[in-house]
Image (spheres, rainbow, N blue to C red):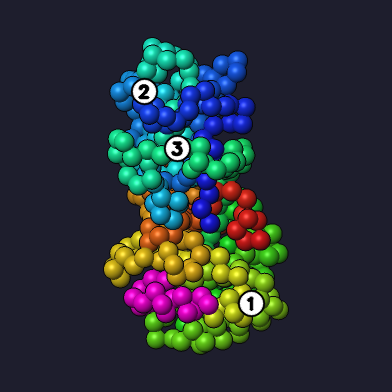
Amino acid sequence: MVQRFKPISDDCHITSEFATGHPGVDFGRDGGSGDQPVFAAQAGLVTHAGAAQGFGGPAPAGWIVIDHPTAAGSGTTVYGSIIAEVAEGEWVRAGQRIARINPDPNTNGGTAPHLHFQVHPFVWQPGSQIDPVAWLDDAPTPTPAQSNPPICYGVDLSNHQPDINLKTIAEEGFEFAILKATEGTWLDPCFQQHYSAAREAGLHTAAYAYVRSETSPQEHADALDNVVRAAAGDMSVPICLDIESGSGTDPDHWRAIHDEFTSRGYQVILTYLPRWYWQQVGSPDLADTGLPPLWSSHYVEPQQGYASAIYQRAGTGGWRSYGGLLVDLWQFSSEATVAGHTIDVNAYLGDPRDLFG
């Protein structure tokens, strides 16, 4: 679902409308607009941030330009006469705080403080702007949790970690665990013990099914039934599809497995599909497959250490969309130190209840 937000707070209003010679709208606030927060209208990639003619400088004063992929709503948005709080190449979320209105006429283009906001329906191109008011269509202002969501960390486990202590994982501050349940028709022998321990430790929990190209959708679902029902007693455990080496190259096969799972009452919440594998199989367009958002894996060296420290140096590349789907979960290291083990760690932006239920 595409998220779109007003780029300024509700107590700001339009001070200059879209018109010939003014290819955007200006927002201001009674009593002064300087330092008011500015938000990304949609998720996307920052392609420009800094000084720009008419919008001021030197950097970080100036403008921000964000390119929005189709999965995020498409188009390009421009935010002018601001002080940028993000950099070129960063991925930003819909509603994320990205800037503040520049209060200084010496560096904001020589105007009274305001936000100049433009919308281009496709790429940034002078003259292609459309009326932002119609485009926003009464979009809401992001809440504080949407503009600056908390980061929560979690792990993913399989039979390769038979003796890991889930209680210790929770005590170290992790909030969720995604547990391998199946690989084709194979059942992970550690799923039941991992699931019980994760629930007892208070962790939000999901299961993942490793997709195999040679296994039918029905066989995948039968295997999942066998292991998940034995552990949970029903089909309330959220499911993630794991698509990587051995999963084949056919998105129709992946979709058929997803559809078989949902037809049996499972909620499929994520598609683990590493960018490298997606590229290896031809970079298919997944926008119309019905697959859920991506669980990406994107590692930045060095990978070793504690999860929070690794994440702080990892940048934002793991949040970039691909294949026509947005990224909801990011596996940012496979070598983090957790409960005395070296394992995968993941980040989610927001309340984990929104993802895991």
Residue indicated by mark 1: 265
Q: Where is residue 188 drawn, in percent x and y?
A: 53, 79
Q: Where is residue 235 drawn, in percent x and y?
A: 66, 76
Q: Would residue 60 be seen by someone viewing this image from the given angle?
A: no
Magenta residues, start to end: 243-259
The amino acid type, in three-letter code, at marker 2 is Phe
Q: How many marks?
A: 3
Between 30 and 313, the one nearer to me in the picture:
30
Q: Which mark is residue 131?
A: 3
Of the residues tagged 3 and 1, which is closer to the observer?
3
Q: Is residue 56 above or below residue 250?
A: above
Q: Earlier in the sequence, mark 3 or mark 2?
A: 2
Judged from the image, the secondary structure of the residue bearing numbered disc 2 is loop
Between 23 and 308, the one nearer to me in the picture:
23
Query: In the displayed structure, does residue 43 sit left or right of residue 67?
Result: right
Q: Earlier in the sequence, mark 2 or mark 1?
A: 2
Query: In the displayed structure, does residue 241 sit left or right of residue 20?
Result: right
Residue at x 59%, y 53% (from the top left corner): 174
Quadrant occupied by the C terminus? bottom right
The amino acid type, in three-letter code, at marker 1 is Gly
Magenta-drawn stretch contains 25: no
Residue at x 53%, y 56% (from the top left corner): 1
Magenta-drawn stretch contains 252: yes
The local crowd at label 3, few if under 14, some if 14 to 19, many if 20 or more residues have their Cα within 10 Å, is some
Residue at x 45%, y 51% (from the top left corner): 73
Residue indicated by mark 2: 55
Of the residues tagged 3 and 2, which is closer to the observer?
3
Determine whether label 2 and label 1 are within 8 Å by CB: no
Q: Where is residue 239 drawn, in percent x and y?
A: 57, 70
The amino acid type, in three-letter code, at marker 3 is Asp
